[in-house]
Amino acid sequence: MGRDCFESAIVPMKRVWTIGYEQATVPAVIGVLTAAGIEVLADVRALPLSRRPGFSKTALAGAVQEAGIAYRHFKALGTPKEGREAARKGDRAGLESVYAGQLELPEALAAAAQLRDLASEHRVALLCFCGDAAKCHRSLLHAAMLADFEAVHLQPEISQTR
């Protein structure tokens, strides 16, 4: 067999990155995003507010844009209050149930379609608070709406100060 047969069979894998900012600083998150070549930060929090300095929507959008990364907020892909409460309690089944209902809403389906299109054209990272992607709705979003994309979970350096 000629080499050309193998080369033509190689299909580039679509990828989406995820990142949680729990116990991280804005510079640490931006550093990891930049190192990964991320072009768009897709904020998938229902409420883009944070007690962690610099992670509320306006401040975060400004910081990533200064680093050359576009910012998009996908509110409809965030976790409703009941799901966030379940996640805080470690109730994975409750989180999964609430979030599955969220993803059935027309606005979530439209947002997911926009996110898929964006991730097909750009290097996109999904951002939420939770540091462990396996415990976060980011993994549920990936499984439900982006399963044909390889997920790469980024880990920013954890801040020693709170």
Image (spheres, rainbow, N blue to C red):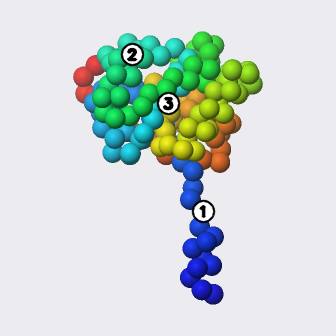
Q: Residue at x 41, y 41 (%)?
A: 38
Q: Earlier in the sequence, mark 1 or mark 2?
A: 1
Q: Is residue 161 above or below residue 4?
A: above
Q: CA distance from mark 1 to mark 2?
A: 38 Å
Q: Residue at x 50, y 33 (%)?
A: 126
Viewer-side residue, 92 vs 81: 81
Q: Which mark is residue 58?
A: 2
Q: Earlier in the sequence, mark 1 or mark 3?
A: 1
Q: CA distance from mark 1 to mark 3?
A: 25 Å
Tell me if 124 is positioned left or right of 156 in this view.
right
Q: Is residue 116 above or below residue 89?
A: below
Secondary structure beneath dot 3 equals strand
Visible residue check, residue 20: no
Q: Amino acid at mark 2?
A: Thr
Kindly indicate whether the residue at mark 2 contacts the one at mark 1 (C-beta within 8 angstroms).
Answer: no
Q: Quadrant of residue 158?
A: top left
- Image quadrant holding the N terminus, namely bottom right
Q: Amino acid at mark 3?
A: Ala
Q: Quadrant of residue 143?
A: top right
- Residue on which the image places disc 3: 42
Q: CA distance from mark 3 to mark 2?
A: 14 Å
Viewer-side residue, 140 vs 125: 125
Kindly indicate whether the residue at mark 3 contacts the one at mark 1 (C-beta within 8 angstroms).
Answer: no
Q: Position of residue 115 (x, y in %)?
A: 59, 34
- Image quadrant holding the C terminus, namely top left
Q: Residue at x 62, y 38 (%)?
A: 116
Q: Which mark is residue 11?
A: 1
Q: Earlier in the sequence, mark 3 or mark 2?
A: 3
Secondary structure beneath dot 1 equals loop
Secondary structure beneath dot 2 equals helix
